[in-house]
Structure formats: C-alpha cells, structure tokens
Amino acid sequence: MRNLHIAAAQLGPIARAEPRDEVVARMIALLERAAQRRADLVVYPELALTTFFPRWFMADQAEVDAFFETEMPNAATMPLFARARELGIAFSFGFAEKLLEGGRPRRFNTSILVDRSGRIAQRYRKIHLPGHPENEPWRAFQHLEKRYFEPGEEPFGTSDLLGGRFAMAICNDRRWPETYREVALRGAEVLLLGYNTPLHYPLAPEHDHLQAFHNHLCLQSGAYQNGLWVVGVAKAGREEGCDLLGQSCIVAPTGEIVAQASTVGDELVSADCDLDRCAEIRANIFNFALHRRPEMYTALRAG
Amino acid sequence: MRNLHIAAAQLGPIARAEPRDEVVARMIALLERAAQRRADLVVYPELALTTFFPRWFMADQAEVDAFFETEMPNAATMPLFARARELGIAFSFGFAEKLLEGGRPRRFNTSILVDRSGRIAQRYRKIHLPGHPENEPWRAFQHLEKRYFEPGEEPFGTSDLLGGRFAMAICNDRRWPETYREVALRGAEVLLLGYNTPLHYPLAPEHDHLQAFHNHLCLQSGAYQNGLWVVGVAKAGREEGCDLLGQSCIVAPTGEIVAQASTVGDELVSADCDLDRCAEIRANIFNFALHRRPEMYTALRAG
C-alpha cells in the first residue's frame, strides 16, 4: 500500500479586482485545513490566482498581461510556497505564464507541481486550448483562450514524488481521452486537473444542463480506462456574472468518485489514495501490453 | 434531420444445447416487434447464434469448431436474412467465423452489418480480444477468447447505408477509448456494439459490483467524446450457470442514454436517432480539426 492523503482545494469566484495576495490568502487557508487532515498534496484549480480573464475581449495587450505571471514563485505566491514548505505539503496550481524567449513574449496556460520542499518538480502547459481567437460579440461572454495563450508545445509529462508518479492536465484537456492515455502510457498514477468551466456553452446552449454530467463522465471514464487516480478541481461559482461549475472531485482508478465538493465556494475535499490500487485496473482489464492493439489505431497514428 | 429508428435486440441466455434455428427464431421474433415500430435497423449481440462458448476449455478442436460458422448467410440464418429483407430492415449480429485461407483454418469473433436488401455491407473482426489463451482451472469459468480466436487484423472500418455512416465493435472493444476515436475519425455516426459480459471477473472480483457502471461509463463517454450514436446490445441473463450483464442501451451523441433494457431476457428497446445530432458535439466542443492535437500524442503514436 502506498497511501497518500490528497486534497482537492476548490476555489470560489475571484473578482476581477481581487488582488493576488488576497487569493493566495484563501489558498493558504485551504492549505491549513488540509494540514489538519495530514494531507500530502493539495491541488488547486486552473488559473488559480486571478479571475478567468479569457471571458473578456481586451484590445490592449497590457491589460491582458496584467493577468500573467512572469516568474514563479513571485512576491504574491511566495507566502503559499513558504507555508507549504513549513507544513511539508506538496501542491499544484494553475496560472497564466508569460515568458521571454529570445526577446519574444510567449504566453501559456500553465500548471505546476511543487514538492514538499518547495521545489517546482514539474511544469505543464495546456495542450488542448478551447474557445476561439477573435472577439465574438454575439456571445454572452467570450472564451478567448486561443487568443491569449499559445498551445503547449510539449507532450504530457510526468514527475516522480511522494512515492508515486504524477501528471497534470488543465480544464479542456480532461474531455479528451488522449490526455489520460498519454499519461497512463507514461506510467502516471495520479492525474491533477484544474478547471474553469462555465455552465453556459454559447455554441450549444441546449447542452448547458449536461455540463455537470459531462464533467464527471470524462473524469470517471478517464480514471477507469487508465487505472489512474484523477483529482479534478474547479474554480466555481458566480464569477463576474458568469456561473462556473463546481463538482471538484477525487476519482479512484475504478472510476468511482471518492470525494466531492458540494458547494461552489472555497471548499476542501480529500481522500486516501492508495497508489497501488492502480494495478487493480492496469494489471487486469486494462493491461496495455496484453490487450492494447496500437498497430490497429491507424487513424489515431495518422492523426 | 436524418432520423433513423434503431432497435437494440437484447438476447437472453442461450443454452449450450440450443440449436441455431431456435435462436434465429427468437431473433426473428424481435425483428417482427421492431417492424411494428417501423425500425430501420436492428442490432443483436456478439456471438448471437450460440452460447458464449469461450467459458469452457475444450481440448478437442472439433468440439470448438461446432460453435463456428463457415459461411454467412447459412442454412440456420437464412430465415433471418429473408424476413429482414421482406420487411426492409437492416440488421447486425455477431458470430464465430471460421474460414480457410490457403488451406489454413482461421477463426475470428466477427460481426456483420446487413443492409435493407439483405446484402452484407460490412464485416468486422474483433480487435481487442479479452481473456487468456490457456486453461486456468482456478477460475469459476474460463474466458478463452485469446485461445479460440485470432485478433482482427484490419483497423476499424465504416460503411455507408440508410443515409448514414456506421461502424461496428465487439464487447471488450467498447472499453477502449481508441475504438470510438478510430471510428469517429473515419466519420462514423453510429457505432454498433454487441457484448457478452459476465458479472464475475475472476481477476478482480472486488469490482464485480461495478460491471454495470463500467459498461455504461464506457458507452456514454465514448458517445459523448466522439459525438456518436452508440448502440450497445447484450446477451444477458444466467447462461449455463454464468450471469451475464444486461443493460442494453442506445446512447445519444450527448452521452445520454435514450433507451435501455430492464430485463435480462429477450427484449427490444428502440429510439429515434437523428444522425444530424452528431454535429452538436463534433462541430463544437469535439471539433477534431480545431481542437485535437495529434502531434502531442507521442505515446499513442509510438504505440
């Protein structure tokens, strides 16, 4: 048995004007609660430090850039890094990352995994950017991830810490079965997955009532079909007039939800996650070496 | 709107001694019920003509071969082909197929799709064979598909009929997300999927109570993540002492179950399936061309 106590630290809405240090104080409050449960790892959502700014079209790049971090840790997040290190808790969160490459600014939707010592063990840049690149005023709100971010250019990776193998994905990544399979083929045992998911989907509003169903359907099937623990963590609630899905949860490798948030505010849920349980699935029904047929997946391979 | 009325024709148990003509009579009875509903297509389960014989180890190949068909249609199934043609109904079912290739016998777990005129429009040979190749007497029953069948050697295909594009998969194929993605990338709008699923899984009996959950989890996520109609059809009930899952169902491209069997006997459920509804998903959230990132799926591609 390799048992970890993992916490999903859901965040309620973050106002556009809310400064990062206030958000970080909320994150630390959740961290303290996790410490009371002797958690080993705390997982926060996508773009955890600010409001979900891709909902607005901003012509002025400086206005957009105000939502980005140019270094990590930085002044605003240092208290979180410091307190987690004191408590010996690993953690993961998402943020908008801006970096300079040969003088050229590049921007990604990024998440990091930080080990018990405060070291960034892994960095992941979102591969499946949803939304659209141009302003579409007919929408109730925008989803301009394809405008404000470049897609990640590195395949899904893993990192080894806490006696297990971890991978990260972000929001829309979780809808794609390729995400789970890629990390499982690399031996990941736990997938950390933050999201901001509006209840309203302007392209097919007749499916709005299915958002919660689709969220869990993807998380649960991804866990089961790959024998993975999945930790899905929402930024939730009514944020600047936009309702975001909650439903943060921890899913066992059997696909069963073992912990779930029941509010759309700041909320901590946690569960014992025995990483050895991945083998119940991956050594049997989903034994990839015995049963998978990659040579038959010609459309996937042609991709 | 391209509306088809599709029926899932679940079969209850088939005894080892039950002759094929009696099974075919049961299939025709379900066909007649489907005709009363003006069904366009009737889908029967995997290995529909006989008991699920891979549950027994048989040392004598002639005993095994008695469960195989060497031509299709044949004398036993001709009445089904004839009646369906009279009624103008397309249909699909699975059977054990034996053929001679250069004098060498080859055996597959096969399904066919027959158009309204009685012509075999498509043949599919099961790609993901579950189970094991050797007798394992410690099991309550065997699952010797890897002994009695060769794995299919052709990738998933599609066929165009009834104004839509169809694909087939068989039983264990439905657990693998690659199955749905392969056929969706080829433009399939409806996936026909027969199964024989014991409630007891000897390798992980602690998951036996999850069989029904896992069945629908895979069918529903596969439908949603690919914007496909999925028709899952069971051979169900207590067959020669082995309990088989029922739960035959039709799943919309939204992942919602729109028709479901509630017995483990011969039972017909059906639904209107508007093939144009695939676009609700595949032109939006799962628009492959816009959002999929095949160049990032390096583990999948390496296979």
Image (tube, coloured by chain):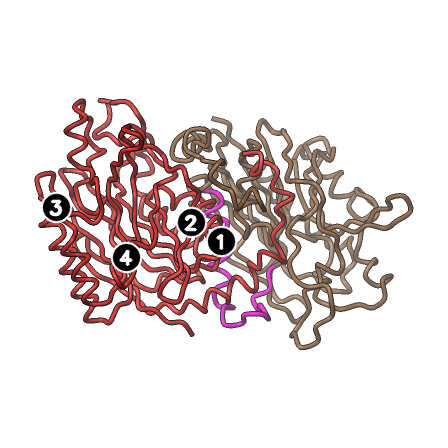
Chain colours: A red, B brown
Residue B242 rendering spot, x and y as whole percentages: 63, 69
User: Of helix, strand and loop, which mostly describes the magenta segment?
Assistant: helix
Q: Name the residue under label 2.
A: A157
Residue B67 horizontal side relative to residue A171, left or right: right
Separation of marks 3 and 1 at Cα, in angstroms: 35 Å
Q: Which numbered circle lies on residue A20?
A: 3
Q: Could you tell me the amino acid type at mark 2?
A: Gly
Q: Mark 1 points at which residue?
A: A186
Q: Mark 4 points at which residue?
A: A119
Residue A68 horizontal side relative to residue B159, left or right: left
Q: Could you tell me the amino acid type at mark 4?
A: Arg
Eyeballing the image, is B41 above or below B20?
above
What secondary structure is marked by label 1?
Answer: loop
Could you tell me which residue is drawn at 33 percent across and 38 percent down?
A207
Separation of marks 3 and 2 at Cα, in angstroms: 28 Å
Could you tell me which residue is drawn at 63 percent across and 49 percent down?
A293
Q: In which quarter of the image is residue A34?
A: bottom left
Could you tell me which residue is drawn at 70 percent across and 33 percent down?
B121
Which is nearer the N-term, disc 2 or disc 1?
A: 2
Eyeballing the image, is A83 above or below B298?
below
Q: Could you tell me the amino acid type at mark 1?
A: Arg
